[in-house]
Amino acid sequence: MKSLLPLNTFHVQNLQLIVNRLHLLLHSTALAFLFYYRFCFLFQLPQNRQGYGLLSWLLVFASETILSFVWILDQAFRWRPISRSVFPERLPEDHKLPPIDVFICTADPTKEPTLDVMNTVLSAMALDYPPEKLHVYLSDDGGSPLTLHGVREAWKFARCWLPFCTRYKIKNRCPKAYFSASEDHADDADFARSSLYLADKHKIKEQYEGFKEEIKAFRKDRPFSRDHPSVIEVIQESITDDVDNVKMPVLVYVSREKKASHPHHFKAGALNVLLRVSSVMSNSPYILVLDCDMFCNDPTSARYAMCFHLDPKMSSSLSFVQFPQKFHNISKNDIYDSQLRSLFSLQWQGMDGLKGPVMSGTGFYIKRASLFGNCARKGSDLLQQKEQFGSSNEFIRSLDGNNTSDLVSDQKYAFLEEPHFLASCSYEIGTKWGEEVGFLYYSVVEDYLTGFVLHSDGWTSVFCEPSKPQFLGTATTNLNDVLIQGTRWYSGLFENGINRFCPLIYGPTRMPLLQCLCFAWLTYFPLYCLPLWCLATVPQLSLLNGIPLYPKLF
Ligand SMILES: O=c1ccn([C@@H]2O[C@H](COP(=O)(O)OP(=O)(O)O[C@H]3O[C@H](CO)[C@@H](O)[C@H](O)[C@H]3O)[C@@H](O)[C@H]2O)c(=O)[nH]1
Ligand SMILES: [Mn+2]
């Protein structure tokens, strides 16, 4: 009976849909009149086509054209908004659930405080999922001894933290957030006032303080260089005092090799190394990608995601389940809209009604096989596969998809030869990594591009937005950071609108038109700044100089 019921359902938001489409009709009629007026004016009288008057007209006309173009693209998001529900209680029993690898990226311990990164790691280890099916990989691009020390300490702390969370069904499993939450928030269960719970809570708080001290006390003066060899440590193996029989997820620290002479491709490069290293260790079919500044706020996300990935109706074409980015540090007035509200509540819902939302960098559960594109097809010969994936036989063997999670604890990996080879910076030379395989390198917004190409290859995605945010991140809240991040995102996005991945050229033969328009909106909306400048100056100057730009009403 259990398996017959659907794991998820969706419903089209009909009222929203009708309002949106009526608005589309009304607004486009108004636009048609505006354009008619502009054309008539230019072609009616010859004197309209000379001097400053003409210049102002053309500038305003060009601005209106750009705005209308961006507006038309934006309508695709509003065409068919849907919302979804999931039923995790209908999932198969724990032993039948597929394994998951969690990838967390960090790059710089000075900008990304180690304690916060470890909180993200701990919250991921404490996901509500069978621990033997969970493998957490931390990629440290800084190659910092402090981060490695932090991971070892985090593992020790996790040995008490995880049982505490399961015993009391703690909902907020990021220790920092749990201890700083107000009492009523943290403890809403029946036993909240029981003396046993309070005593345990007190004890675990002390252990957390000890863990914090351990990280603080670490010598930080060691400079970290851009050149460093790869360091890989399966934390599970380094601890021997198996006092209590606590089942723990595997925790792996990976710092890939870096040389100034080799491009490292930022986060996409780090994720691809994790993809390779994990494939010869746990090789889980599903991967959760997290930024180090984004912790799991609710432990149920893995089960929620599996409600889609295990749904036989959608799983064959489903590449990833995207959760919205929500933030814990939004200021009261949020004057820069750091929450990115329209993206994560309105537009992603709209794309969900088409072929699925854009990959948003963090908080998504992706099917590993989808990242190997068409290259991984069975039957292609070994030589060809080596050209695409590099020369590791073990990696190529892993493409068959047979999970090898028991190998993590195998003696074979005591020396970790193969993972080191896969994490070396020369491994990718001459291969298709970053071009056709894994996360793509052509863009600073690797998430957008990888998602776009996946959609072009026929994969779909799903947007899952439960009422309680599953992940909480740190938003940019001051003008300086907003401008730096904005410039990086919008220039990166716009670049994708004018290179060979232009959604309006590359897309239409590969995906439905409305989906193309959504991607096109993302790449072209940075053009907004041009009409903004024009309309903030030209009409005002024209008014002062007596140049009419708009029709007289009376
Ligand atoms: O060389 C690098 C650079 C960055 N990172 C990590 O990548 C993540 C995101 O980088 P960040 O500098 O915080 O960028 P944001 O602008 O905050 O990130 C947003 O935009 C990125 C680019 O689109 C996406 O990858 C992110 O997921 C998304 O949250 C962080 O965890 C970093 O530690 C690395 O691992 N290696
Ligand atoms: Mn960030």
Image (cartoon, rainbow, N blue to C red):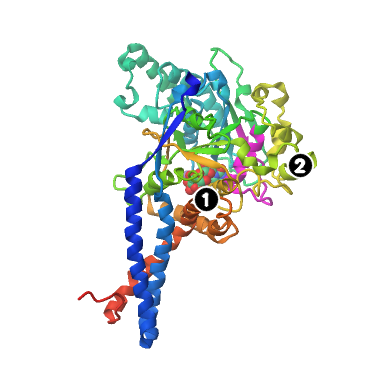
Task: Pick out the residue farthest to the left.
Answer: 554
* Other-residue count near label 2 (Cα within 10 Å), few / some / many at <14 / 14–19 / ≥20: some
The answer to whether residue 292 shows anywhere in this view is: no
Q: Is mark 1 on a helix, strand or loop?
A: loop
Residue 400 in picture, x, y percent from top left: 70, 32
In reply to whether residue 268 is colored magenta, the answer given is: yes
Q: In the rendered image of this protein, does residue 96 appear above or below residue 325?
A: above
Specify whether tag 2 is near ligand 1 (CB below 8 Å): no
Q: Can residue 10 be seen in this view?
A: yes
Q: Distance between the residues labelled 1 and 2?
A: 34 Å
Q: Where is residue 508 in the image (x, y as percent from the top left)?
A: 55, 55
Q: Mark 2 points at which residue?
A: 386
The amino acid type, in three-letter code, at marker 2 is Lys
Report the front residue among 333 and 19.
Answer: 19
The type of residue carrying mark 1 is: Pro
How many marks on residues? 2
The crowding category of the residue bearing disc 1, from other C-alpha atoms within 10 Å (few below 14, some 14 to 19, many at least 20), is some
Tell me if residue 162 is in the magenta stretch. Answer: no
Segment tinted magenta in the rendering: 253-278
The residue wearing badge 1 is 512
Residue at image coords 41%, 30%: 176
Q: Is residue 61 above or below residue 450?
A: below
Give percent across and percent down for residue 234.
63, 27
Task: Specify the quadrant that holds the C terminus.
Answer: bottom left
Name the mark nearer the viewer: 1 or 2.
1
Residue 231, picture quadrant = top right
Which of marks 2 and 1 precedes in the sequence? 2
Please determine whether, in this image, residue 158 is positioned above or below residue 318: above
Work out which residue is located at the far bottom of the displayed protein and give it. Answer: 47
Q: Nearer the viewer, residue 285 or 11?
A: 11
Kindly state the secondary structure of the residue where label 2 is placed: helix
